[in-house]
Image: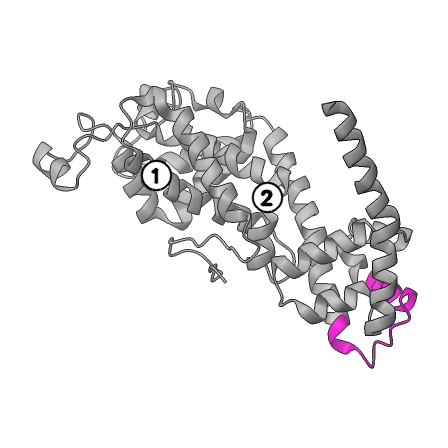
């Protein structure tokens, strides 16, 4: 019975998409004198709501030109908009704002795809201790987070002080590759004060430089610490999954006027790193074994926020070059 209902539902969805929806679009254009793209740009403010509708309209169009528009090279966006305007028989001189709106939206769409490719490339690049650039980034991370504690050696238990699992951090980057290291270094360099504070607070009371009285005064007396670097790599995985699933489109389409780039991704990581830290403290875990449960709960909360098309994750770190606000 369930299988039958599923088949019937799929049939009606197919019928709607292939017949009713196209008929409705045709009638609406005749009544309003505007194509779907014109109506979208006219009735929606710039941001995720508009761009997501433009993206959906292009992807599900019966025109191959419109379908392929979402995957053109950024350098071809302007020409693609001209072709769309010609296909839709829209006079650009009479509708100058439409071309501007479509170009901004399409740049966001192809920019998101380009960002996904760039992030995936970094994730797939393994940390190589024979690569001087990789080694320089890792040592820079140490110097930024532990400026008053010289590293005694490349292989050292000191790495545990900033949250790595063992004496050689390269083994911790296996899941996220170079992406994990770059995110940690970006956080440490672009919002050093906050990164140092989060690192400090992530330490257990016994490992913290604060006295017991100071710890209790700051209400962290019952807090369970966590490994800063390992959690940073884990949060990198969370932001990556949001990007791959498309959930991050809401945020990026609301904050990037045109093409989202790696900087936007890294700023999002910094924000979520701070938010997870606060969330961890609020949850007051009994031990570190609760990490996965709390991480999953945090992930669901972020997804719920991103379901709102007007949502833009708002970072608190001073280094942000953009004003990321909840519109």
**With respect to residue 20, does 298 lie above or below?**
above
State whether residue 306 appears in this view.
yes
Dominant SS of magenta comes to: helix
Foreground of the two, 230 or 158: 230
Where's residue 133, x and y in %? 53, 35
Identify the residue at image location x=68%, y=40%: 117
Check disc 1: other Cα within 10 Å, few if <14, some if 14-19, many if 20+.
Answer: some
Cα–Cα gap, marks 1 and 2 = 20 Å
Q: Quadrant of residue 26?
A: bottom right
Disc on the earlier residue, 1 or 2: 2
Q: On the rendered structure, is 193 left or right of 72?
A: left
Looking at the figure, which quarter contains the N terminus? top right
The residue carrying mark 2 is 247
Name the image colouring.
one colour
Q: Quadrant of residue 14?
A: top right
The residue carrying mark 1 is 279
Q: On the rendered structure, is 265 left or right of 4?
A: left
Where's residue 283, x and y in %? 31, 34
Identify the residue at image location x=79%, y=60%: 77
The stretch of residues the image draws in magenta is 79-98
Find out whether residue 87 is within the magenta segment. Answer: yes
Residue lying at the far bottom in this picture: please name it. 94
Foreground of the two, 45 or 172: 45
Where's residue 67, x and y in %? 84, 50
Q: On the rendered structure, is 200 left or right of 102?
A: left
**With respect to residue 240, does 316 lie above or below?**
below
Q: Secondary structure at mark 1?
A: helix
Q: Secondary structure at mark 2?
A: loop
Identify the residue at image location x=86%, y=63%: 84
């Amino acid at each position: 019975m369930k299988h039958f209902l599923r088949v019937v539902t799929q049939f009606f969805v197919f019928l709607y998409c292939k017949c009713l929806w196209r008929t409705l679009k045709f009638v609406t254009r005749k009544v309003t004198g505007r194509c779907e793209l014109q109506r979208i740009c006219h009735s929606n403010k710039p941001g995720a709501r508009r761009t997501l509708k433009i993206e959906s309209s292009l992807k599900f169009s019966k025109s191959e030109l419109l379908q392929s528009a979402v995957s053109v090279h950024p350098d071809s966006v302007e020409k693609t908009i001209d072709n769309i305007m010609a296909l839709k028989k829209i006079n650009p001189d009479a509708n100058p704002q439409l071309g501007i709106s479509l170009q901004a939206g399409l740049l966001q769409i192809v920019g998101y795809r380009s960002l996904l490719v760039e992030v995936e490339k970094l994730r797939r690049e393994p940390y190589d201790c024979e690569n001087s650039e990789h080694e320089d980034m890792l040592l820079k991370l140490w110097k930024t987070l532990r400026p008053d504690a010289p590293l005694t050696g490349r292989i050292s238990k000191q790495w545990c002080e900033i949250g790595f699992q063992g004496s050689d951090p390269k083994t911790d980057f296996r899941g996220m590759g170079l992406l994990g290291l770059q995110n940690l270094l970006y956080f440490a360099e672009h919002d050093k004060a906050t990164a140092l504070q989060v690192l400090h607070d992530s330490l257990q009371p016994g490992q913290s430089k604060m006295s017991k009285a100071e710890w209790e005064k700051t209400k962290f007396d019952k807090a369970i610490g966590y490994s800063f670097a390992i959690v940073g790599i884990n949060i990198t995985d969370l932001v990556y999954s949001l990007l791959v699933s498309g959930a991050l489109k809401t945020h990026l389409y609301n904050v990037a006027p045109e093409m989202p780039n790696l900087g936007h991704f890294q700023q999002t990581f910094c924000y979520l790193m701070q938010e997870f830290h606060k969330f961890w403290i609020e949850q007051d875990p009994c031990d570190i074994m609760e990490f996965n449960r709390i991480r999953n709960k945090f992930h669901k909360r972020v997804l719920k926020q991103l379901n709102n098309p007007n949502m833009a994750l708002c970072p608190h770190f001073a280094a942000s070059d953009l004003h990321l606000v909840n519109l």
